[in-house]
Image (cartoon, grey):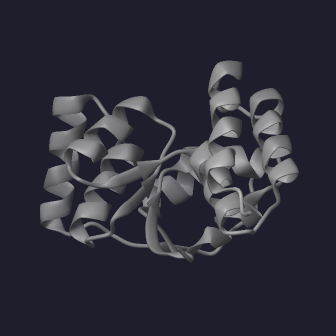
Amino acid sequence: MGKIERAVFDAGPLIHLAEIDHLNLLDIVKEKVAPEVVIKEFRGHRIEDIDLFVLSLNDKGKEHSDILMKEYHLDIGEAEAISLAKQENIRYFFTDDFYARDVAKELNILVHGTLGIVIRAYRESVIDRNTACDIMDELYANSSLFVTSKIVTKGKMMLKEFEKP
């Protein structure tokens, strides 16, 4: 598969991975993109800078973002990130927000959350299976990510799909 060329990020996955000191997993993406509002939210958590490209919405993108906020009750960060993905024709969007995931899917954007980043990092051999399981446990126990033990167990089971013989 290889690295993802470009992806748009919402603040959630950035914050959650930073909380457990695993921002290195973002190396699965060559060009990480986010709107300014997401960068401000991320930095508001007093987290060190990472290699993110800040892109602005054009007028059409801003209008689209406003519609997403009104019609789907998304926060500005999620709405702008989705609009940015559409504006820049970026296929991947990383968020942990349930409603933002649904909206992105409706708009034919490939969407994944923090656990998806961990699974992809394992699949791309950035980390081994034990480390991936440990990171999922850390996310459950030591981050602000809302995730149940059942979802963590499912994530660990998904790792088996990508085991190499």
Q: Identify which residue, 50 or 147, lies in the foreground.
A: 147
Observer able to see residue 57: yes
Snapshot quadrant of residue 146 = top right
Relative placement, left or right, of 92 versus 48 is left
User: Can you say whether 143 is above or below 82 in the image?
Assistant: above
Label count reads 0
Residue 88 vs residue 27, the one in the foreground: 27
160 left or right of 96 in image: right
Name the residue rendered at 18%, 32% in the picture: 70
Q: Is residue 43 visible?
A: no
- Whether 140 is drawn above or below 148: the answer is below
User: How far across and how far down the image is residue 155, in percent?
Assistant: 64, 37
The residue nearer to you, when weighing 92 against 165, is 165
Q: Nearer the viewer, residue 15 or 108?
A: 108
- Across and down, in percent, residue 100 comes to 36, 38
Give the answer, above or below, for where 141 lies relative to 5. Answer: above
Q: Position of residue 101 (x, y in %)?
A: 37, 39
Q: Quadrant of the C terminus?
A: bottom right
Left or right? Give the position of 76 relative to 164. left
Residue drawn 31% across and 63% down? 85
Choose top left, top right, bottom left or bottom right for residue 89: bottom left
Q: Residue at x 68, y 46 (%)?
A: 160
Q: Residue at x 71, y 38 (%)?
A: 156
Give the farthest residue toward the front.
165
**Would you say 153 lies left or right of 73 here?**
right
